[in-house]
Amino acid sequence: MVPSPKSGTGKGPETARELDSPMRLSYSAVSSYEKCPLSYRFQYIDRLEVAPSPYLSFGRSMHSALQWLYSRKVSEPPALNDLLLELDACWESDGFCDSEEEDSFRRHATEVLTAYYQKNVADFRLPLAIEERFEIEMDGYALSGVIDRIDRRPDGSYEIIDYKTNRKLPELRRLREDLQLPIYQIACSKTWGISPSKLTFYYLIPNQKYTTKPQDAQGISRVLERLNRTAEAITARRFPATPGPLCPWCSFQDVCPERIKADSMEEKYASRYRSLLKRRDALLEAIAELEREMTQQGFSPGGRSCEERRDEAN
Ligand code: SF4
């Protein structure tokens, strides 16, 4: 475990309740706002569902397997076969269009994890922390996140590591502008009083690391400015649509005014309205299915039943 939080800061859900500000930002939220404020609004304010995808399931399964790899009680690495059995056990099956697609992603995950193991097993060490949550009080908002791994290096310094499942490394320019590792640097310093000497993205598919030095005081103040700007814009409820090359991968195209093709405003509104009703019906259906499953297993879903909610919604 990393050192206990410094006084006045902390981690975990308790801290969120202690904070006066209701706004909570994470790296993903800020990055989503910077790409398209409207898509941020759909996801984090309206809380519309993000469609499951093979890539999300692949990424989550890989993270779980790596979490298992480094959660050992002894400092010896497990056998590769045990790691691959763990990947099987924690594999997430959401978002695949059929079993053929899922099998192909699963085979790919096995290859990627095997290559990772082979490259890293000789230097296996237990990390200082894995999946470490933090939540820090900022100027008018809370900054939260989960750090994949913090290593204590042989020379006693610290390295922050975040796993990525992109196919290849992004352009250097984009990596330099990215906020994730600087946010983790801030979290380490404010929460545990640690100043890391290295910040690393580990790109699992090409099995390559991108390591950078920590930000200096000027760099940190630029990061804080960007975070504060985002927090202010959200507080002012500025959510303009920003169409761009990422739109075809956006989960909210069915309700985005920029993506709906229609001849008139009235048709556009009608189309968005129909899409939202469809999303609501799908959600109510999923709740009903879960209620049935819980009842079958002898658990009480509690609260109002889906039928009651549906009647109320209509
Ligand atoms: S489809 Fe494009 S413009 Fe619309 S919300 Fe998504 S990213 Fe933004």
Image (tube, helix red, strand yellow):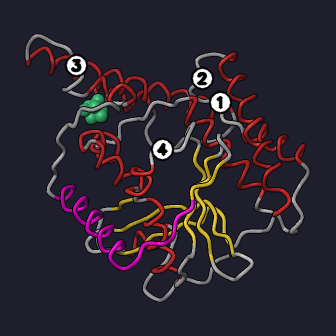
- Residue pointed to by mark 3: 260
Q: Quadrant of residue 129?
A: bottom right
Q: Secondary structure at mark 1?
A: loop
Q: Is mark 2 within 8 Å of ligand 1?
A: no
Can you tell which mark lies on residue 93? 1
Residue 150 lies, in percent from the top left, at 63, 69
Q: Quadrant of residue 141?
A: bottom left
Residue type at mark 2: give it.
Answer: Phe
| Real-space CA distance between mark 2 and mark 1, rounded to the nearest whole angstrom | 7 Å
Q: Is residue 278 above or below residue 55?
A: above
Q: Secondary structure at mark 2?
A: loop
Quarter of the picture containing the C terminus is top left
Give the residue at x 39% y 66%: 143
Residue type at mark 3: give it.
Answer: Ile
Q: Residue furthest front?
A: 172
Instruction: Name which of mark 2 and mark 4 comes first in the sequence.
Output: 2
Q: In the displayed structure, does residue 7 sit left or right of residue 55?
A: left
Give the residue at x 48% y 63%: 181
Whether residue 217 appears in magenta in the rendering, the answer is: yes
Query: For mark 2, does the 10 Å Cα neighbourhood hold few (<14), some (14 to 19), or many (20 or more) residues?
Result: some
